[in-house]
Amino acid sequence: MCGRFAMPWDPDELADRLGVNTNEDARSVAPSYNIAPDATIAVIRRTADGGSLLAGARWNLIPAWSDTDRLPYPTFNARVESAADKPTFRDAARHGRILIPMLGYYEWDAPRTPYWFHARDNRILLAAGLLSIWRGMPTCSILTRRAEGRCAEIHDRMPVVIPPSRVQPWFDSGTDAQTAMEAVRSVCSPRIRSPRCEATGPGSSNPSCPRPGRACSSTETAMDRFTRRAVSSRDGVPNRRAVWASCRGGIRRRGCRPRACRAPRRTGRPPDRPGTRWRAPRAGPSLPAARPAPRCTGVGTDPRV
């Protein structure tokens, strides 16, 4: 699945990087680090004279035979294994094969932690896609395949990324849809790294989206966090409020006793952490018996006498 990606270049700069021409639809595309479905994105399509053109398209494919632009199922992704046979994507797989440039894309694991997938050298990724014209409006979808490598640890699907050497065969109109899909399925994906990143909500679109999260970076160690927090950013003087002490390979505040390092309290119940040795509280010395209260010897008589 690919439900969010980044394309941070304006259309003219992107066209210069790729060496293609642009049209009016592409110039209306706004660069964004957080592109969601139904947005207008930049796509690369083949022209009648065999050239490449950077155009704009709505990211949610609508087949030409549809009566409405709101289908009961999402179409921003299409499985490469079945796109040539599905009625929704069949015509687009024959005559509407395109490329979608991106810097990277986002995926979420089961606990809904976002991950940022991109090339190690931050080059432009070319994802395979399908284009369909619905009542004069171009719409598109991104092809996905079974995830492999590091990507498979986060999600079971990933976009079909095509290397520059396979661009011409993908655009070849003489190749039938089934053969084209089989060809891109066997393409080896580039080496993609996937550090955890800041949460990407639908309304956020800034360069901080793909940056690794402060508390969940895969490359930042405990000592890196200690150095970053213990040293002031102004003059390099150690920050007294961030004095830390080492405790079993981790970093903690001085004076704080982590649960893993302190002895279990003798509260009469087992500790929370399994495997921790626990002893029942010892019985203390017995208290002396209480003296009985004096009895009254008669009405009006002081019992203290």
Image (cartoon, rainbow, N blue to C red):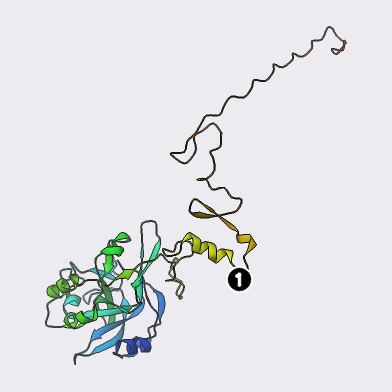
Q: Is 268 above or below relative to 75?
A: above
Q: Tell me where residue 130 sits by quadrant.
A: bottom left
- Please name the residue shown 31% across and 70% down the image: 192
| Local secondary structure at mark 1 | loop
Question: In the figure, is residue 223 to the left or right of 255?
Answer: left
Looking at this view, is 76 or 2 the one in front? 2
What x and y, as percent, mark residue 153?
A: 31, 60
Residue furthest to the top in view is: 297
Q: Mark 1 is on which residue type?
A: Gly
Q: How crowded is mark 1: few (under 14 residues within 10 Å), some or many (20 or more)?
A: few
In which quadrant of the rendered image does the N terminus lie? bottom left
Q: Is 282 above or below relative to 72?
A: above
Question: In the figure, is residue 150 to the left or right of 273?
Answer: left
What x and y, as percent, mark residue 279?
A: 51, 31
Q: Exactly how many numbered labels are in the figure?
A: 1
In which quadrant of the rendered image does the C terminus lie? top right
- Please name the residue shown 54% across and 43% down the image: 262
Looking at this view, is 148 or 184 the one in front? 148
Question: In the figure, is residue 120 to the left or right of 299?
Answer: left
- Please name the residue shown 13% across and 72% down the image: 178
Looking at this view, is 259 or 45 the one in front? 259
Instruction: Identify residue for label 1.
Output: 236
Q: Is 58 above or below relative to 231?
A: below
What x and y, as percent, mark residue 172?
A: 15, 83
Question: In the figure, is residue 282 to the left or right of 114?
Answer: right
Q: Tell me where residue 169 sits by quadrant.
A: bottom left
- Please name the residue shown 56% across and 64% down the image: 229
What x and y, as percent, mark residue 40?
A: 35, 79
Q: Is residue 136 visible?
A: no
Q: Is 62 above or below relative to 48?
A: above
Q: Is residue 138 visible?
A: yes
